[in-house]
Amino acid sequence: MLEKTTIARPYAEAAFEQAREEGELKSWSELMVTLTAVVRDKQMRLLLENPRVTSEQIMQIVTSIVSGSLSKTQSNFVRLLIEAERLLYAPEMAEQFEQQRLDVEGLANVDVISAYPLDDGQRQRIVEAMARKLDRKIELSESTNQELIGGVIIRNGDYVIDASVRGQLEELCNELT
């Protein structure tokens, strides 16, 4: 069976091209996030995987969830996903769509995990350093994890900077053993 990202790619690319053509990247991005949430809901997933539930019933449910805010092309896209039995791949489509959106807009998502909440100065230094490193505007998302003891872990896709005390201790332990 094909890998999920491979199956999702043509749908994500088609959605992205349509969104660009319409000048509606934001609304399409929101649709992809909503579809991902629908698919990840346990009860919805059971419904989507139930062979007795028709495509039309699924379409009605999904449409009611997004509260009728779909454009005609978005509605057609959702219908296509349902009829082609590809709605379950929405998380992978959303990820690929978002990456294309970020590339076009010259942005990069940077996740920062710190032992304690960052102050404005720390946040600004991280944004400036990552903007220089990636040559893009930075969208920063933060979370805390006290298990890090101190410091931060900064992530952009596969690029990771582990400047946490826990990471340094693990590295020291590996060198000693």
Image (spheres, rainbow, N blue to C red):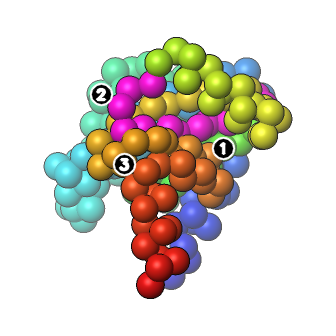
- Camera-nearest label, 1 or 3: 3
How packed is label 2: few (under 14 Cα within 10 Å), some, or many (20 or more)? Answer: few
Q: Mark 3 or mark 1, which is nearer the start of the sequence?
A: 1
Q: Is residue 116 magenta?
A: yes
- Residue holding disc 1: 99
Magenta span: 104-118
Can you tell which mark lies on residue 17? none
- Residue holding disc 2: 64
- Camera-nearest label, 2 or 1: 1
Name the residue nearer the viewer: 45 or 97.
97
Q: Residue at x 48, y 42 (%)?
A: 152
Determine whether 27 is above or below 62 in the image. above
The quarter of the picture where residue 135 lies is top right
Q: Mark 1 or mark 2, which is nearer the start of the sequence?
A: 2
Q: Residue 51, position in %: x, y?
A: 24, 65
- Camera-nearest label, 3 or 2: 3
**Left or right, residue 49 beside residue 70:** left
How packed is label 1: few (under 14 Cα within 10 Å), some, or many (20 or more)? Answer: some
- The local secondary structure at tag 3 comes to helix
Instruction: Inspect the image, locate mark 2, and give the three-letter code of the amino acid beneath it.
Output: Ser
